[in-house]
Image: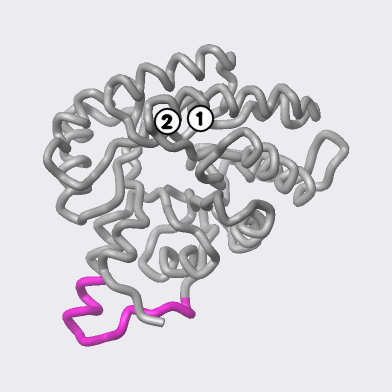
Amino acid sequence: MTHSYLELSKMIDHSLLQPTLSDRELEDGCRLAVRYQVASVCIKPYAVRQAVEWLRGTEVIVGCVIGFPHGNSASEVKRYETEVACRDGAREIDMVVNLGKAMSGDWAFVEADVRAVCDEAHRHGAKVKVILENDYLADGGAGLGADELKIRLCQICERAGADWIKTSTGYGFVKQPDGSYNYRGATEHDLQLMRASVSGKVQIKAAGGVRDLDGLIRVRELGATRCGASATAAILDEYRRREAAGTPVAGGSGSIGAGGY
C-alpha cells in the first residue's frame, strides 16, 4: 500500500520538548512544522501562547504537555495546567498518568486524574492524549503482568474520556544493567496491544523510537494515527527523495522501538 505525503506528515506531532530549547529554537521548530505540513507541534506549557502566534494562519495546531514527564503533579494542578494551556490556545493536550498510583493499583485515583484533565480540555474544545510511559510498566505492577497492566490502563483512559492513548513521553529513562539510562519508547508489541485494548473511538499515538520514514509507516500499519517525532525533517525529506526517484512510498520494511525521540 502506498502512502501520500500528507497522509504521513499529518500523523506527526513535531516534538519541541527538550529541556534546554531556547526561544529561538522553539520558533525555528514551529517554522519547520509549517514547512513540512505536520499535524501539530507538541510544546511546553510556558511556550503555548507564543507558539500560537508563530503558527497563526497556518494549519499546524499547538499541543501542550501536562504533568510532564512523570505525571506526578496533583490532579488539580494538572487540571489547572490544562485550563491555562487551553486558554493560551492549545488544541491538544498530552498528559501523563500518575505512574505511582498505577503501580499501587489505585484505579479510582488514576481514572479521576485522567478524567480531570479530559473534562477540562473538552470544555475548551481540546482533545487529550494520555501517556502511559510503557517503559516503566515493563515488569508489571499492582499484582498484574506488564500486558495486563497496560490493558487495564488503556481501559481506564477510555472510560475517563481520552481521545488518544500514547505509548511514551520520550523521557522515560530506565536504569540499565550497566548503570546507564535508556528507553525503548514505542514498540510494535505495545502498539498492537493498545490498539486491541480500546474501542475505535480512541486513537493511538506512538512516541519514542520512530526516527525514519519506514518507522513512521510501520506505526501507521499498526494502527497509530499520530506519532511524536523530533526527526521530522529527516523523515519527510526521505519521503521527498523517494518521490523524486519514482520509488513508491509503501510499507513492509520499517521497524521501531530503538529509543530516541
Rendered location of residue 115, percent (x, y): 59, 27
- Residue 45 left/right relative to 114: left
Circle 1: element type: loop
- Residue 222 left/right relative to 54: right
Rendered location of residue 119, percent (x, y): 52, 26
- Residue on which disc 2 sits: 65
Report the span colored magenta: 239-253
Q: Say whether residue 84 is visible.
A: yes
Instruction: Identify which residue is drawn at 48% across, 42% down.
Output: 170
Assess whether residue 109 is covered by the magenta stretch. no
Q: Quadrant of residue 70?
A: top right
Instruction: Identify which residue is drawn at 32% across, 38% down.
Output: 16
Residue extending farthest right: 143
- Residue on which disc 1 sits: 69
Q: Main secondary structure of the magenta part?
A: loop
What is the three-letter code of the residue carrying label 1?
Pro
Quadrant in the picture for the N terminus: bottom left
The answer to whether residue 64 is above or below residue 260 is above
Q: Residues within 10 Å of mark 2 (few under 14, many from 20)?
A: many
The answer to whether residue 186 is above or below residue 15 is below
> Looking at the image, is mark 1 or mark 2 nearer the viewer?
2
- Residue 160 left/right relative to 8: right
Rendered location of residue 243, percent (x, y): 21, 79
Rendered location of residue 34, percent (x, y): 17, 48
Q: Say whether residue 179 is visible.
A: no
Label 1 close to label 2 by CB (< 8 Å): yes
Q: Quadrant of residue 29?
A: top left
Residue extending farthest bottom: 246
Instruction: Identify which residue is drawn at 63% across, 38% down.
Output: 157
